Image (cartoon, rainbow, N blue to C red):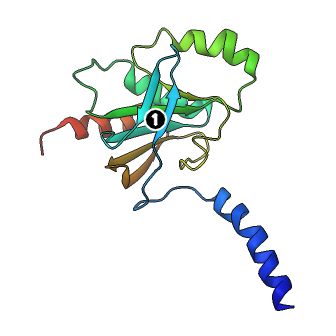
Amino acid sequence: MKTLLLCLSCLLTPMWAYAASYVAGDAINPISLLDQNDQTISVTDETQVLLFSRSMKGGDVIKEALTPLSMTQMPAGLVYVADISGMPSLIAKFVAVPQMQDLPFAIGLDREGEISRLLPDTKDMATMILLNQRNILDIAYFDSSEALGQALAKLNQPQ
């Protein structure tokens, strides 16, 4: 009986680990993706702010918050990653990605959903993850571009 329980535990543990997402205090793995213009975008030790969306609504919140910002208004070390794996590939290829190419900022596109699977999210919200050397300091969720814009503006204020 003990052997059976041990075997089941070993078999199920990877599934539990797979389902978990990062939390404050965790160190995230480096991320490297192609953006909407096929340029490499990476989350490295220098990344201080990671914006993440898994849904169209979360993506709209981030897009509306970032679009009016000039490059000098963007927080230092900001990277935006979007999981577009749920989008039909033809829609992504012929509609969504071409529209993204007009944006004034880069979006790291996770087309398969594997690279960003551990990034935390809440349904229909944008995620902001504050990092220090890839260690998560804080995670916040936003359902409006105004609230996200205010949070980003605070990051640009001198401490």
Residue bearing the label numbered 1 = 144
Does residue 91 appear left or right of residue 142 in this picture?
right
Amino acid beneath label 1: Ser
| Mark 1: few/some/many CA within 10 Å (<14, 14-19, 20+) | some
Does residue 86 appear left or right of residue 27 in this picture?
right
Q: Residue at x 66, y 11 (%)?
A: 95
Quarter-of-image position of residue 128: top left
Query: The N terminus appears in which quarter of the rendering?
Result: bottom right
Q: Residue at x 31, y 20 (%)?
A: 69
Element class at badge 1: loop
Please provide percent x and percent y for residue 70.
Answer: 27, 17
> Is the residue 43 above or below the residue 97 in the image?
below
> Is the residue 66 above or below the residue 22 in the image?
above
Q: Residue at x 68, y 32 (%)?
A: 85
Q: Residue furthest left?
A: 158
Quarter-of-image position of residue 59: top right
Does residue 21 appear left or right of residue 133 in this picture?
right
> Is the residue 21 above or below the residue 7 in the image?
above
Please provide percent x and percent y for residue 114.
Answer: 64, 41
Q: How many marks?
A: 1
Please provide percent x and percent y for residue 103.
Answer: 45, 13
Quarter-of-image position of residue 24: bottom left
Q: Residue at x 21, y 22 (%)?
A: 72
Q: Residue furthest bottom?
A: 1
Please provide percent x and percent y for residue 84.
Answer: 64, 29
